[in-house]
Amino acid sequence: MSEKKIIIAIDGFSSSGKSSMAKQLAKSIGYRYIDSGAMYRAVTLYAMQKGLVSPGVEPDTEAIIKSLPEINIGFEVTDGGQSTILNGSNVEKEIRSMAVSQCVSPIAAIPEVRHALVAMQQAMGSEKGIVMDGRDIGTTVFPDAEMKIYVNASAQTRAQRRLSELIDKGVATTFEEVLANVISRDHIDQTRAESPLRKAHDAIELDNSTMTIEEQNEWLLDTYRNIASQL
């Protein structure tokens, strides 16, 4: 098998399991994992802390754009995996809240926000050897990525997965609330003018609605080995 380092782009809908798959693959092959969605969530959290957006309220787009130079995002490997760092503080728990989930898509649709984070992401992948997941990694961030995966699952399946995650974290919510959020995010992600969620023409599609986590991880690793062996 070739030892050539590549870029692996995994795109898909919210709560489709792409982040868990990406993390496991990166760990298995010794690559760096980058959660692009966490970066958008971090910007959203910053905007919420500054009173520039809140659930059900349109974001103050102009103020958010002006605040972008003040936002520094990074990742830190911890005992529990990987944490998102916002301006020096570990915000991994905060960015996974339902409130952030309700606000992130409108902010992620702001062109200037996307431009700023895409530039950060491209810099992170400049030396390759990364697995990055998100909505536009294989289409906008790394259109020349050697391996592209597009993950999908039914909205009901994804809502149930998300609800289980929130319950495990002690977050009080309902299936109906989570499903409504999933459907709303799908619509915003697919219809925004800037880098909408879509399958890259050369991406391999995976519908994991009925797959176990182990089956997904095995499929992804086998796919990587097949692609890497041909380089």
Image: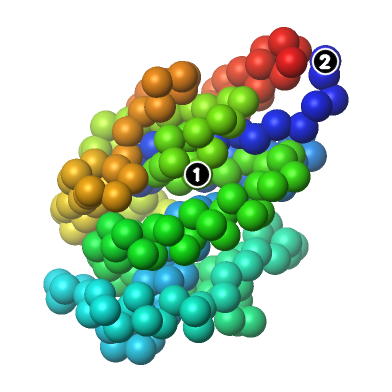
Q: Which mark is residue 228?
A: none
User: Where 3 falls versus 17 (above or below)?
Assistant: above
Task: Name the secondary structure under disc 2.
Answer: loop
User: Where 33 falls versus 169 (above or below)?
Assistant: above
Which residue shows up at 63% across the image and 82% down it? 88
Per the image, the residue denoted by label 2 is 1
> Residue 148: percent from the left, percent from the top?
52, 27
Give the camera-side residue of 52 and 177. Answer: 52
Quadrant position of the C terminus in the picture: top right
Which residue shows up at 57% across the image and 70% down it? 73
Per the image, the residue denoted by label 1 is 141
218 left or right of 167?
right
Task: Name the secondary structure under disc 1.
Answer: helix
10 Å crowding of disc 1: few (<14), some (14-19), many (20+)? many
> Residue 184: percent from the left, percent from the top?
18, 51
Q: Amino acid at mark 2?
A: Met
Toward the bottom, the furthest residue is 50
The span from disc 2 to disc 1 (Cα, nearest Å) is 26 Å
- Disc 2 or 1, which lies upstream in sequence? 2
> Residue 179: percent from the left, percent from the top?
21, 49
10 Å crowding of disc 2: few (<14), some (14-19), many (20+)? few
Quarter location, residue 97: bottom left
